[in-house]
Image (cartoon, grey):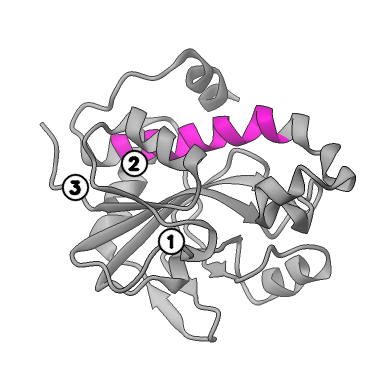
């Protein structure tokens, strides 16, 4: 039996598809990178679900992040809803994952190079491009690390279709096609585990990824 489901906000088609498969019937919104497809406030509890970049090498690809606080682009702080955070933490642990609860920063651009170290020095562990932009009363986030200081993404991937036209980004494509779906599925599986008494069946790829 499911708990009451929050509105699930994803940025990309990849993340939205993972949520639909893991949690069928969830009230999901594909809001676009940086919430470009979303207009206005959302009513009720909201959880963002998808990928993030880690800001320190100690958080490798595949790390689950459930921040207690998100720094907004305008410098303010968004404190995540404790009940939603608790549900996501419990969901991750049921999957054998120990989530990182440190602060996350929402940026309007991909954070790369020296900016990663600068945000890490301020105590942030990861970055996304959506959560801190939300207008909602109760917010939480579950993210899985895709890019790291040791494996950065080109800024071209802020616009994936445009990136395909840039040869400099092609070298990252094979790695992205392998890792991004795995990370998105794990984030969605944590979500399903958090808001169902019995999580939905895992796919073989998820089983291997969770044990890594």
In magenta, the rendered stretch is: 176-192
Residue at 28% from the left image edge and 73% from the top image edge? 41
Taking the view exactly as shown, the residue that stands out farthest to the bottom is 75
> Label 1's element?
loop
Q: Which residue is mark 1?
A: 37
Taking the view exactly as shown, the residue that stands out farthest to the right is 168
Give the class, few, some or many, for how many residues have Cα within 10 Å of label 3's Cα (few <14, many ≥20). Answer: many
Q: Which residue is mark 3?
A: 5
The tag earlier along the polypeptide, 3 or 2, is: 3
> Label 3's element?
loop
Q: Is residue 208 above or below residue 169?
A: above
76 relative position to 91: left or right? right
Residue at 55% from the left image edge and 18% from the top image edge? 208
Q: Position of residue 83 (x, y in %)?
A: 23, 59
Give the class, few, some or many, for how many residues have Cα within 10 Å of label 2's Cα (few <14, many ≥20). Answer: many
Quarter of the figure with the N terminus: top left
Q: Is residue 93 above or below residue 27?
A: above
């Amino acid at each position: 039996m499911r708990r009451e489901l929050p509105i699930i906000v994803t940025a990309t088609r990849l993340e939205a598809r993972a949520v639909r498969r893991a949690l069928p019937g969830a009230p999901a919104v594909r809001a676009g990178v940086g919430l470009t497809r979303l207009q206005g406030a959302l009513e009720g509890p909201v959880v963002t679900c998808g990928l993030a970049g880690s800001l320190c090498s100690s958080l490798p690809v595949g790390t689950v992040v459930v921040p207690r606080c998100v720094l907004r682009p305008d410098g303010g702080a968004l404190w995540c809803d404790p009940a939603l955070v608790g549900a996501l933490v419990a969901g991750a642990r049921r999957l054998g994952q120990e989530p990182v609860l440190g602060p996350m920063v929402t940026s309007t651009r991909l954070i790369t190079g020296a900016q990663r170290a600068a945000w890490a020095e301020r105590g942030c562990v990861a970055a996304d491009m959506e959560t801190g932009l939300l207008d909602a009363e109760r917010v939480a986030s579950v993210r899985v690390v895709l890019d790291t200081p040791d494996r950065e993404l080109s800024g071209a991937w802020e616009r994936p279709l445009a990136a395909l036209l840039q040869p400099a980004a092609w070298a990252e494509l094979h790695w992205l096609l392998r890792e991004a779906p795995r990370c998105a599925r794990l984030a969605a599986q944590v979500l399903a585990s958090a808001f169902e008494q019995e999580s939905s069946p895992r796919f073989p790829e998820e089983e291997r990824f969770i044990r890594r």
